[in-house]
Amino acid sequence: METERFAQFKKAVLDQVCSAIVGKRETAELVLTCFVCSGHVLLEDVPGTGKTMMLRAFSKALGGKFSRIQFTPDLLPSDLTGIDFYNQKTGDFEFRPGPLFANIILADEINRATPRTQSSLLEAMEERQISVDGKTYKLEEPFMVMATQNPLESYGTFPLPEAQTDRFFMRLRMGYPARQEELTLISRPSTAHLINEMPVAVTPEDIAYVRQHYTQVQCADAVAGYLMDLVERTRRDGAFAAGVSTRGAIALYKASQAYAALQGRDFVIPEDIKAMAPHVLAHRLSSASLSRAEEAGAYLQRLIDSVPVPTEQI
C-alpha cells in the first residue's frame, strides 16, 4: 500500500473543492472519506449553507458522469430508474436509462419525495443495481449518492425512516462559515461559476486504487477493542432505544481505515475512531428520550468522550 499516493489523492481533491467552497475543508474531507469507502453521504442543514454546491464541487473534482435529481412529491420511481418504451420503428421495447445511471448522484431534498420513490433510490444504493420490468441492470463504479435534506421543514416532506437513514454511510452538517470566510464569499464571483470552470483533479486509476487498497490499513487489537467499547456503550445506554447495529460497527471500522490512509498512515489510531464516530454513528441511533438530532449528537459525543482510550503502545 502506497500511503503517499493516498495523501496526494486527498490533497488534489480537497484543494480543488476548497478553491470553490470556502472554509469547509473538514466537511469536504469527511465526504472524501465516505467516497473512498464506497459509501453514501446524507448532508443535512438549513437552506443556503452550501450543501448542493459542496456536492457539485466534489463531482467535478472526481470526474465521471454526474446526475442531479431534484426530489419532489410527484417524482416516480421510474423517473429515477428508467423505463422500457416501445420503439415504433423497430417494433421492439427499448430501455431508456434514468438519472441513476451515473457515477455521482446528487439527490437534492430527498425528504420531499414519497417513501416509494425514496425506497427505489435506497435499493440502488444498497444493491448497486436496478430492476426494471424483470430485468436487472448493474450500475457502474464508482457509484455514490450524495443526498441533501432540510431538517427544519416538515410541511410537504416525508422524513426518512431510521432503517433507511442507516443505509447512508455518514450524516454530515455544513454549518455557517466564519465571519471572514463569509466576507470572502459575498465579495467574489459566484460559486456556481467557479465550479463550472473546475477541472478534474484525479484520474480513474487513482480513484480505483484508493477505493481498493484502503482496507490494507492495519488496526491493532487494542484499537479494535476500543471501537467495540464505543459500540457496546451505545447498546447499554438508556438514552437510546436501540444501539449501533453490526452494520454501523463495520462502517466505523472502514471509515477509520480510510481516514487513516488519507492522513498518510497505514495503521489506525484511537483518534481516527473518535473523529469518525459522531458522523458514522449518530444517525444510526434510535433515541427514546432525545427528540432532536442535535441533542442526540451532543449526547453521543459526551458518551464517546467517556470511553477510556487505550494507552498502551500500538
Image (cartoon, helix red, strand yellow):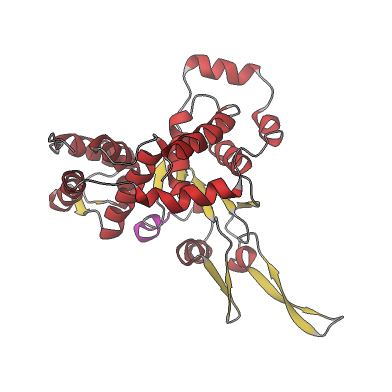
- Residue at position x 52%, y 53% from top? 144
Q: Quadrant of residue 310?
A: top left
Q: Position of residue 29 (x, y in %)?
A: 45, 36
On the rendered structure, is 291 left or right of 135? left
Residue drawn at x 46%, y 39% is 6
Decide whether residue 163 is among the magenta residues. yes
- At which x and y percent is residue 205? 57, 49
Q: Quadrant of residue 222?
A: top left
Q: Which one is nearer the viewer's eye here, 209 or 305?
A: 209
In the rendered image, residue 38 lying in the magenta stretch gets the answer: no
Question: Horizontal placement of 45 versus 57: left or right?
Answer: left
Q: With respect to residue 190, does 90 lie above or below?
A: below
Say whether residue 206 is left or right of residue 216. right
Quadrant the C terminus occupies: top left
Residue drawn at x 61%, y 80% is 133
Residue 161 is situated, as x and y percent measured from the top left of the image, at 38, 58
Q: Is residue 48 visible?
A: no
Where is residue 107? Give x, y as percent: 56, 51
Count of picture labels: 0
Q: Nearer the viewer, residue 235 or 16?
A: 16
Q: Is residue 59 visible?
A: yes
Magenta-tinted stretch: 159-165
Please, which residue is most extreme toward the front here?
A: 2
Residue shown at 52% from the left, 52% from the top: 208
Q: Residue furthest bottom?
A: 91
Q: Is residue 67 above or below residue 75?
A: above
Residue 197 occupies which quadrant of the picture?
top right
